[in-house]
Image: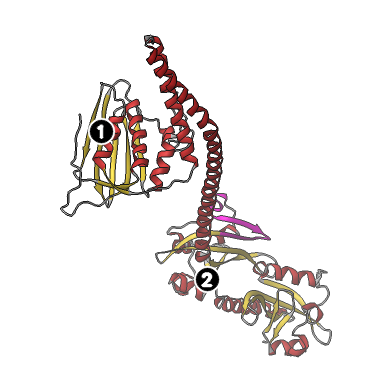
Amino acid sequence: MLTTIVRFDLDGKIIDFNKDAERLLGFSRSEVVGRHLCETILPASGANGREMARVVEEICLSPETHGSVVADAVKKSGERVMMHWACCPFLDHTTGKRAICAVGIDLSARDRASDALRESELRLASIIDFIPDPTFVIDRTGVVQVWNRAMIELTGVPAEKIIGKGNYEYSILFYGKRRPILIDLVLREDRHVESKYRNLAKSNGAITANSYITVKGSRMYVRGKAARLYDSSGKVTGAIETFTDMTDWKRMEEELKKYTERLEMAVQERTAQLREKERLAAIGETATMVGHDLRNPLQAMTNALYLLAEEVASAGSASGQVSALIEMLEGNLEYMNKIVSDLQDFARPLKVIKTNTPAAALLETVVNSITVPPNVRVTLDVVEGLQIYTDPLMIRRVFTNIINNAVQAMQDGGTLTIRGYESLGMTEIKVSDTGVGIPAESLKKLFKPLFTSKPKGMGMGLAVSKRIIDAHGGSIEVESAPNKGTTFTIRLPAGRRRADGRGTDEGRQRS
């Protein structure tokens, strides 16, 4: 019995034609290769009146759902012959594209039709066996009929161990338990099982979906495709499913998603930084103009007030009230002058002139320059000989601002503790108070210019302080909680000690 094998691409053009096909249909291979099926071995319409071009198009679009087709063929002589075609997709290694292999049996002799069909099915099973993707076939009752070589390689289960078994035996190999899987869904719909799959899609009786499976202890991400199988009368005989390993693709997809998320975060952070720079530039420009415009009038008022105080003193007629008013004006002018200085310092480029500076002497000078209420106890605890490599004038201003804030936070009294020591090549100064603390929502904004929680102030002191510390290559951190006090930690480059290991200043403690 002749076994006609015709291979054609997804456009319906013949790419191979075996010897049995030449003998049965009378065409030589060279006469048909490269030409469309309907131009050579197929009639314009079949015995049932269907256009054969349409039948070929359906097979090319969905070969899995047209595994078995009965149709007329046309010999070179023009004689028609009834054929049973078993169609199966395969990968054409010459072109790297999918194609169709059709194995045909002559059904002209009706008494041989049953044998021909069985033989065609055997040949189809042989073709499936050589498909590179893991593939298996079940009948209508769920019993395994075909288990190809790729499936054996994937699962490690030989065909003879699984063929003939039902009751979802195959599901145990993929999901660890008996349950309907994709191949069963084309035979019996089950919404609950469908919900277990990702990207499930149905088309022309076929189902495609993605899922994680575990095979031989390894977790894989696969794309499965299942379709019904039909006999020559159009009756459903079973189903076929094939897997494609998508594990690498899924990993790359997840990595790309993470990279995209990180990129979006980086863009958001960079955008926020640029906006902050624009805001700071605008503040700096405004600060320069305001500082310039106010400095001269402030100096004139300071001079005038000084002359007024001298005049009143020389006249010897100053009352207590007049003296108090002059003192109040002097205090307010000093405060206004500090605001102008903060604005100008924030706007102008910093020129740091570093020198070895004894930490204890610097901190004691700052404490002595601040008015500390009697109900505030001050403890200064600095490691002996501790040095800071810094611009003393700039850093004095930083500590003046931070220590003054600490004192102001303890209106009802408390303890101010200043500790200094060396850590990892840096001089570390901690300024702690037992005051009212800082709310959590304010901590994030603490070093931003023009932010203040005080009823009086411009909110430039800490912003200028951080700028000075940054210019020294140092850092500043703050820990605080409402009603539990606040601790500022300032880290600055450590200065050099004397050869004998001691500094030029002794550690001091003041209470």
Left or right of 195? Residue 219 is: left
Amino acid type, residue under disc 2 in the picture: Pro
| Residue at x 55% of width, y 75% of height | 132
Residue 12 or residue 47, whichever sits in front = 12
> Where residue 316 sits in the image (x, y, percent)?
37, 11
How many numbered callouts? 2
Amino acid type, residue under disc 1 in the picture: Thr
* Mark with earlier residue (1, 2): 2
> Where residue 476 sits in the image (x, y, percent)?
36, 42
Q: Is residue 478 above or below residue 388?
A: above
| Residue at x 45% of width, y 34% of height | 341
| Residue at x 53% of width, y 35% of height | 292
User: Residue 417 bears which disc, if any?
Assistant: 1
Residue 69 or residue 449, whichever sits in front = 449
Quick one: SS at disc 1?
Answer: strand
Mark 1–mark 2 distance (CA, rounded to whole Å): 74 Å
The image quarter containing residue 113 is bottom right
Segment tinted magenta in the rendering? 191-209
The quadrant of the rendering that contains the C terminus is: top left
Q: Residues within 10 Å of mark 1 (few under 14, many from 20)?
A: many
Q: Which residue is mark 2?
A: 134
> Where residue 169 sits in the image (x, y, percent)?
46, 63
Mark toward the viewer: 1 or 2: 1
